[in-house]
Structures are given as C-alpha cells and as structure tokens.
Amino acid sequence: MLQRIPWDQYFMSQSLILSSRSTCERLRVGATIVRDKRIIAGGYNGSVHGETHCIDQGCLLEDGHCIRTIHAEMNAILQCARFGAQTEGASIYVTHFPCLNCSKAIIQAGLKQVYYLHDYANHPYALHLFKQAGVEINQIDFPANFFTDLEESLPLASRK
C-alpha cells in the first residue's frame, strides 16, 4: 500500500523546493504559508523586484548582513498582502529558523505556528516573542531515507 507523506513533511518539502529559487549565495531559504491545509503563499530569499541579484553581482553586505536580500518569510507574507490572502491563524513552514525581524513580522501577520527544519542563530528574543504571542514553534524532522523512499514510491513512468 502506498504511504502518504505527512502534512508537515509535505509543506516543508514545498519550502525546500522554494529555497532552490533563492538568489542569495550565503543561505538558501524557502517559506510556505498554509491555512486550513492549503498553501496560500510561498517565498524565498532574494532581491527586490527589478534589483540585481546576489548571484549576479555578489551580496551587498553591511554589518555582516546582506541588505539586498528580502528574507523568504517576508516575501511570503508580502505575497499574501499583495494578493489579499488572509494570514490570521495561518502557519508558516520555513527551511531555517526565522531571524528576529522575520519573527516580528510573523507575529504581526497573525501567524500562529512556525515549523522549521534547521536551527539558524535562533535568537532568544525571537523565542521570547513567539512564546509571549502564543505562536507555536515546531522543528520538523525528516527520516534519513525520506527523499530516497519518496522517489522510489513514485510511479515508474515519472522516473525517466
């Protein structure tokens, strides 16, 4: 019998795919916003629309941070704003733990769950803010052979 991928791993897989669109050379991050088990937005870290990408001209660093890049979480939240998708009570799946500024934006957007794959300079104040705001934090786990098993479970016609 075919095993179905669990919801959390399904949505995190979408974030991993989104991260492959990143134009930042320092870290590839993807984010997926989900409400009622439906994807309402996705984002990856990259430059402002119409601006040069880091992969083309290098990062624009200031105080050790690339100021050219918009983070994946912010891009996903802004996509919701641009297209009128309600974020109140939704969840976000991010490949890396959100930075402090993205954590603040997540709270302000009314997101209630943050699911992440990798720890990444988890800021103690972000953790405090999430707790204070009642935002649930969960690290997603993938079994070591998850992607190999997934590929092997696909129909033969799709494995050309």
Image (tube, rainbow, N blue to C red):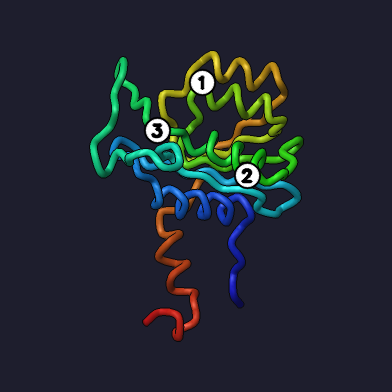
Q: Helix or strand or loop: what does disc 1 sit on?
A: helix
Which residue is farthest bottom? 157
Q: Helix or strand or loop: what does disc 2 sit on?
A: strand
Name the residue type under label 3: Thr
Q: Earlier in the sequence, mark 1 or mark 3?
A: 3
Q: Residue at x 71, y 53 (%)?
A: 37
Q: Residue at x 67, y 31 (%)?
A: 136
Q: Earlier in the sequence, mark 1 or mark 2?
A: 2
Name the residue type under label 2: Ile
- In the image, taking residue 18 as reference, residue 26 lies left or right, namely left
The residue under label 1 is 100
Q: Are marks 1 and 3 in contact (CB under 8 Å)?
A: no
- In the image, taking residue 69 as reference, residue 139 lies left or right, namely right
Tell me where residue 65 appears, x and y as whole percent. Answer: 34, 22
Q: Residue at x 50, y 49 (%)?
A: 15
Quadrant assignment for the C terminus: bottom left
Name the residue type under label 1: Leu
Q: Are marks 3 and 2 in contact (CB under 8 Å)?
A: no
**Badge 1: how crowded within 10 Å, few (<14), some, or many (20+)?**
some
The residue under label 3 is 69
Which residue is farthest front? 50
In the image, residue 7 above or below residue 119: below
Question: How far is the residue under mark 1 from the one under mark 2?
Answer: 18 Å
**Badge 3: how crowded within 10 Å, few (<14), some, or many (20+)?**
many
Along the line of sight, which residue is nearer the eye, 53 or 21? Answer: 53
* Marking on residue 33: 2
Tell me where residue 134 appears, x and y as whole percent. Answer: 72, 24
Quadrant assignment for the N terminus: bottom right
Q: Residue at x 61, y 37 (%)?
A: 77
